[in-house]
Amino acid sequence: MRSWASQGALSMEHSPKLAALLLAIAALFASACAVALDPDAPAEDAGDAASQAAQTANALTSNALTSNALTSNALASKALTSNALTAEALSGHPLTAEALRDPAARTLLKYVAGCALPAGEGFTVAVNGDEFSFPGELGLAASWGEEGGACDEACRSWVSGCVLARVNYLGHKVNISVRGDREELQADKVERAAYPRREATYYGNIFAPQRRYHACLPPEPSSLARACGPSRETCAIQIAGSCDSLCDAPDSDGSFPNCRGKVRSSSGKLVVERTPNPGSVTVFLR
C-alpha cells in the first residue's frame, strides 16, 4: 500500500458535484510514489517515483474527471481502453490524439497513468509542440502499458477505484493511505499505525458510457469532508451506504473488498448492483 501527500485542486466551477468528485480524487495518490503530477508540467519536471511511502502533488479537478474529452466521449473512452497506454497508441488514434488537446483530459490521464503503470515507467506525449509526461506509480494495470496492451474489465475496475480515491474537495495537501486486495496496495505495520482512521472505500467505473462513482462508509464514525466537502448531498461521488452491507468482510489491513454500488432500476428505485467491484480501494487517514 502507499501513503501519499496529495494536493487536490479539482475544479467545481461548473458543477458542485463534479468539483466534489475531482477534488476528492486528488487525495488518493497521497499514498504512492513521489512524483510531480501537474498534468501540464514538462517531462523533466517528474520527480523520483521510487519510494513506497512518499509525497505526490495532486491537482485533479472534478471537471477533469467528469467533463474531459477522454471519458465524457464514449468513443474516445473506448479508444483509450481498447489500445495500449503508450505514447504511440495515444498519438496514433485520432480520437485520443484529439482528446489530449484538452487540458482536463491530460489531467485525468496523469492520474490514470499513475494508477495503472508501475513506478519508473510512463510515457511522454507531444501536443502542439509541447511535451507532457505521464509517469507511473502504482502498477495496478501494468500490462496496459505494454505493446498491444488494453484495459480489460479488471483494469478498468482497479484504475477507477484508484482514481476515485484521490478526489480531494478542498484541493489542500492531505496525507492518505490507500489499501486494497492487491500486492501493490499492501500496507506495512508502520503505515497502518501512521494512518489508523478508515475514511471510506471507493469504487466504480470512470470509463463506462454511464460512468459510476461510488463510495461506501465503514461501520465506525467517518467524515467525508476530504472527498465531498461540506455536504454529501452535492458530492460527486454517490455514497452507496455501509461497507458492511455492500462489500465482503474486511481484509486484515481493514480494507473492504468486492464492494457494490447502487443503480436505478427501470422503476426508478435504487437497487444494489449484482456484480461486485474487485477494484475497491479503501482510504485511511492520519
Image: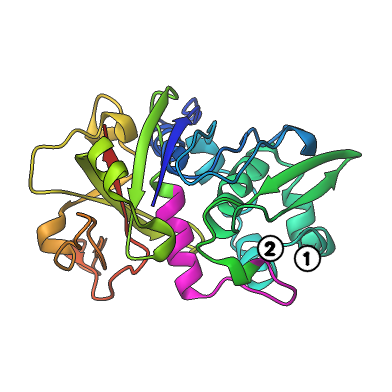
Instruction: Report helix, strand or loop for mark 1.
Output: helix
Above/below status of 80 relative to 8: below
Q: For the residues marked 2 and 1, what is the alpha-carbon distance in whole angstroms?
A: 7 Å
Location of the C terminus (image quadrant) = top left
User: Residue beneath label 1, please?
Assistant: 89
* Residue 210 appears anywhere in the view: no
Q: Position of residue 74 (x, y in %)?
A: 59, 62
User: Residue beneath label 2, please?
Assistant: 85
What is the number of callouts on the image? 2
Q: Position of residue 53 (x, y in %)?
A: 45, 41
Q: Amino acid at mark 1?
A: Ala
Say which of 266 and 97 sits in front. 97
- Residue 134 on the magenta segment: no
Q: Amino acid at mark 2?
A: Leu
Above/below status of 130 relative to 268: above
Instruction: Report helix, strand or loop for mark 2.
Output: loop
Q: Position of residue 5 (x, y in %)?
A: 44, 31
- Outermost residue to the right: 129
Q: Position of residue 273 (x, y in %)?
A: 24, 69
Asked whether disc 2 touches disc 1, contact meaning CB atoms under 8 Å apart, the reply is yes
Magenta span: predominant SS is helix
What kind of colouring is applied to the model shown? rainbow
Q: Which residues are magenta?
A: 145-163
Residue 171: image quadrant is top left
Say which of 171 and 141 sits in front. 141
Does residue 101 appear to the left or right of 158 in the view shown?
Answer: right
Say which of 226 and 72 sits in front. 226
Residue occupying the point 23% across, 56% down = 253
- Residue 160 on the magenta segment: yes
Pointer 2: residues within 10 angstroms few (<14), some, or many (20+)? Answer: many
